[in-house]
Amino acid sequence: MMAARETVMQTKAQRPHVVIAGAGFGGLQAAKALAKVDVDITLVDAYNHHCFQPLLYQVATAALSPADVAWPIRAILRAQKNVRVIMARVLAVDARARRVHTSQIDLAYDYLIFATGSTHSYFGHDDWAPFAPGLKHIADATEIRRRFLLAFERAEVVDDDDARRRLLTFVIVGGGATGVEMAGAIAEVARRTLQHDFRRIDPRTSRIVLIEAGPRLLPTFPAPLADYATRSLRDMGVEIALGRAVTGCDAEGVSLDGSRIEAATVIWAAGVVASPAAEWIGAEPDRAGRIKVNADLTVPGRPEIFAIGDTACVAGGDGRPVPGIAPAAKQMGAYVAKVIAARVQNRPAPPPFAYHHLGDLATIGRKSAVVKLGALQITGFLGWLFWSAVHIYFLIGLRNRFVVALNWLWSYMTFQRGARLIGIAPPR
Amino acid sequence: MMAARETVMQTKAQRPHVVIAGAGFGGLQAAKALAKVDVDITLVDAYNHHCFQPLLYQVATAALSPADVAWPIRAILRAQKNVRVIMARVLAVDARARRVHTSQIDLAYDYLIFATGSTHSYFGHDDWAPFAPGLKHIADATEIRRRFLLAFERAEVVDDDDARRRLLTFVIVGGGATGVEMAGAIAEVARRTLQHDFRRIDPRTSRIVLIEAGPRLLPTFPAPLADYATRSLRDMGVEIALGRAVTGCDAEGVSLDGSRIEAATVIWAAGVVASPAAEWIGAEPDRAGRIKVNADLTVPGRPEIFAIGDTACVAGGDGRPVPGIAPAAKQMGAYVAKVIAARVQNRPAPPPFAYHHLGDLATIGRKSAVVKLGALQITGFLGWLFWSAVHIYFLIGLRNRFVVALNWLWSYMTFQRGARLIGIAPPR
């Protein structure tokens, strides 16, 4: 079996072999940027699809279908002949032997790019995970959608007032962009989409609580935009608890210091931890588990290994750490492709990686968003239009843009949501 | 707890209470047809959505998303004030006390309609189920999609020739409309959609086998249409094995009398068995588990209980049994609503149920279908256009029609499939 495996990656040994682990924004960009370079690329991902994570919250709140925000990796790269795509999970890396061990196949590499992203972090309380799912993959989004919609169904049949209140309470932990967007979307579904659908409960009476440990929402945004988002959410009936840390999560709700919220549905949007790439190669991680890379995004002591996106810790041009957002990952992906191209073509290395911050965006329901674009700050409906245009533009694939635009238009006009399916297994 | 439950259904005791079990084509039609009758209706379904089963095979083959063929039951009936919807599973019926026990709530009824449908039958070989999933619910379709797409991913990385052949062999058991449609769709995905997506395998070399125990495909269609479907599928590279019964199913493939097909993906489209409604009330079932109902669709000896759709066995006007298809279920649903309305309003009972067969339709890939409409028989592209128009027309909800039409147009023009997601859990 090992012999057979060897043949797989030795067949094209004449050209440098670039293995990219992860087909998120960074990995995909790296693969595309190497299209015209004389290398063979293997792109490995545990899923068969690239997921447009910024819109996952729309899947979680039943506005979009999974297929609207995800696209088969193979289909994206179909025409690029120097890349093959392998659906497999990276298990280990032998940096000395330059080999990646995956769940399906072993891969020898000349260059290795870690673009393996991050997952949610419960700050040492992994036992909270079953009660407060986070939002990183399609499966997370459909699970949150299931819990969210099922809570209303259960509330409709339950006779106990306390149980009904608990079922109609939704807690979002974390006041960053994801938390703000989730809270706004949930408020809209409860107050508008479902308002005529039930006979015994009134979904408009739902309690929606957004908890943030820091002093304000959207900490990476300018204060006026955060204030605007706070006011908008409160106008939509979202309770905002600032400066409150969650001290416990269980099947019945969450505990804060000194108080308690009974809630059947809790969503975790508070903090991430990097993939275990640092562990695989024995590199030094920062507190968030990211590999502290050199200025050219190589791993210290391993010039043939790169880390990008949420897996990398690097200072931007201004000395501040590069944020864990899609544009940063894409810029890093494009940069390492340049570094590899320079080496393969024996040209001088490009200057150190410099991050260009394009802006910050967060939407608050169907008629409002906050946008920071350089010195420009936009709020309200104009912000929402801008936000929609940007997201539709960046969605991969003509069809997705089209269907997403159509769904949004439909949702906007009718308050209806197209993907209100409680999945899969029938209720017990 | 029981006391609390009682209050639930006694609150409106002044009006007759109709409980409808199942929100498929029959149950939904019955609920709608009772909109203007002075009754209270409770519609119970194990899922929160009505599923448009005739298009499920398009979800299984990644052409449509689940939300394109399913619609929240509550949303469909939102404006009908005399119906409430309960998401629960029927567990038992106490016909003497006129009570339905569900997983969520107990319901007293004055009239009870069984519209609980059918599930696939393995003819006494339930141990085959894990190896040959059938296609009744959304979850079945996404599971088949997962297996189908994963087979190509696995084939791309495997080194053993036999294993690769096994992974690229797809067997469909059952040559009725569902089997024919699945075989055609799978052939199209393998031969066209995926043709440029892989580097080591050629999906066009896939082997697709349609097995039918009877002497020909589409037994309920006129012979010339069945012949046309057979020729069309063979032209698309589908092997058709007629008069061959499956004698075994396991993880490696299927056994026929005296031969064997190694296949990683087997799909079951061969026969159904009714829901256990007959068992719940101790009624006499026919061989397929259906309740043998009277000419007014009541259960013998229980004039307040009706059975419709796949759960009922009744002779049509011509003496032949009413087929288990959507139009039949809808006609029965509308009929029992009339019977109940007549009783509530003290009017004479309507004449016995008479079934009007509208026609038969089956599509064969993206450019062909067979249609029987009264004396009219249509094949080929014209048939496909007709088939598309009919299905889009009957899809519930403006949005679904729109999105489905758009997806079909897109698939037709590009051979691409919009929902090529291998779900949920990452591969091991």
Image (cartoon, coloured by chain):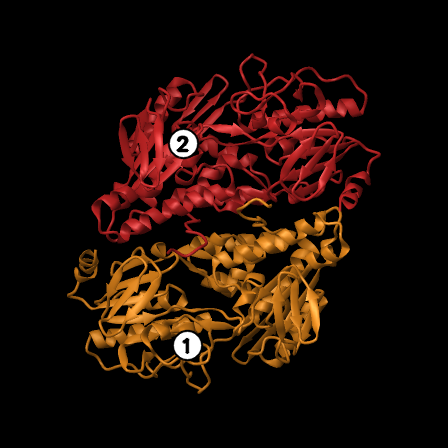
Chain colours: A red, B orange
Residue B261 or residue A211, whichever sits in front: B261
Question: Element under label 2?
Answer: helix
Q: Which residue is drawn at 70% across and 57% down?
A: B191
Point out residue B146 in the picture as x, y percentages from the top left corner. Answer: 58, 53
Marked residue chain, label 1: B
Q: Would you place residue B153 above or below residue A254 in this image?
A: below
Please, which residue is most extreme toward the right here? A14
Point out residue A341 in the picture as x, y percentages from the top left corner. Answer: 75, 25
User: What residue would you read off at disc 1?
Assistant: B290
Q: Can residue A35 be seen in this view?
A: yes
Marked residue chain, label 2: A
Residue A383 or residue B303, whichever sits in front: B303
Residue flagged by tag 2: what amino acid is it?
Gly
User: What residue would you read off at disc 2?
Assistant: A179
| Tags 2 and 1 touching, CB below 8 Å | no
Q: Within 10 angstroms of label 1, few (less than 14), some, or many (20 or more) residues?
A: many
In three-dimensional space, the C-alpha distance between marks 2 and 1, rounded to whole angstroms, equals 50 Å
Residue flagged by tag 1: what amino acid is it?
Arg
Q: Residue at x 69, y 15 (%)?
A: A351
Q: State the mark number for residue A428.
A: none
> Which quarter of the image is occupied by the C terminus of chain B?
top right
Q: Residue at x 34, y 64 (%)?
A: B90
- Tally the marks: 2
Residue A50 or residue B371, whichever sits in front: A50
Please, which residue is most extreme toward the bottom here? B319
